[in-house]
Amino acid sequence: MNIFPKGKKVILFDGVCNLCNNAVQTVIEHDKNDVFRYASLQSDFGMQLAKEIGVDTSKIDSIILVDETYDYWTKSCAAIRIAKDMKGAYTLLSVFLILPKFLRDPFYDFIARNRYKWWGKQESCWLPTPELQAKFLG
């Protein structure tokens, strides 16, 4: 990819999921060091980046965290690593990294399977305000 934001981490998320959109808005609010940039999995940038890191979005529709070296994390690993870079009490969630993925991911998967039923789904991707537009890619 020719335009990966230097020194940033990219969060790929389901742009039509209300839970995912609320989570992104929470990250933006607590990202005091301006660590993250955002792209929906449905955007051109999101689809291209997922392809370049080798993630088949037809099999993984969860949150994906990508750093500038193209290392990436999905599901609970992504969520916890994002929390680790946020300010405030969210950093305490990083303690869950000591638990193996096979214990964390079933909980994550349960929520992900039910996210549309519990929080709803939008007809189209959420659009950031003009003030936040610079944080979103493609």
Image (cartoon, rainbow, N blue to C red):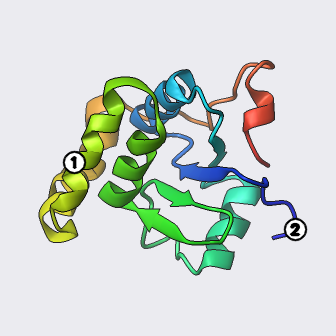
Q: Residue at x 16, y 53 (%)?
A: 107
Q: Amino acid at mark 1?
A: Val
Residue 92: give x, y in percent of width and height: 27, 36
Amino acid type of the residue tagged 2 in the rendering: Asn
Residue 69: x and y, percent?
A: 66, 71
Apparent side of residue 27 relative to residue 77 in the rendered image (left or right): right
Label of residue 2 in the image: 2
Quarter of the image that includes the N terminus: bottom right
State the residue position of label 1: 95
Residue beneath the point at 34% across and 40% down? 116
Specify the farthest residue to the bottom. 54
Name the quadrant containing residue 134: top right
Residue ID at (38%, 49%): 79
Place of residue 60 in the rendered image (x, y in percent of width and height, measured from the top left): 43, 67
Picture residue at 47% right of the left edge, 41% below the top: 85
Q: Residue 121's quadrant in the figure?
A: top left
Q: CA distance from mark 2 to mark 1?
A: 35 Å
Residue 18 lies, in percent from the top left, at 44, 31
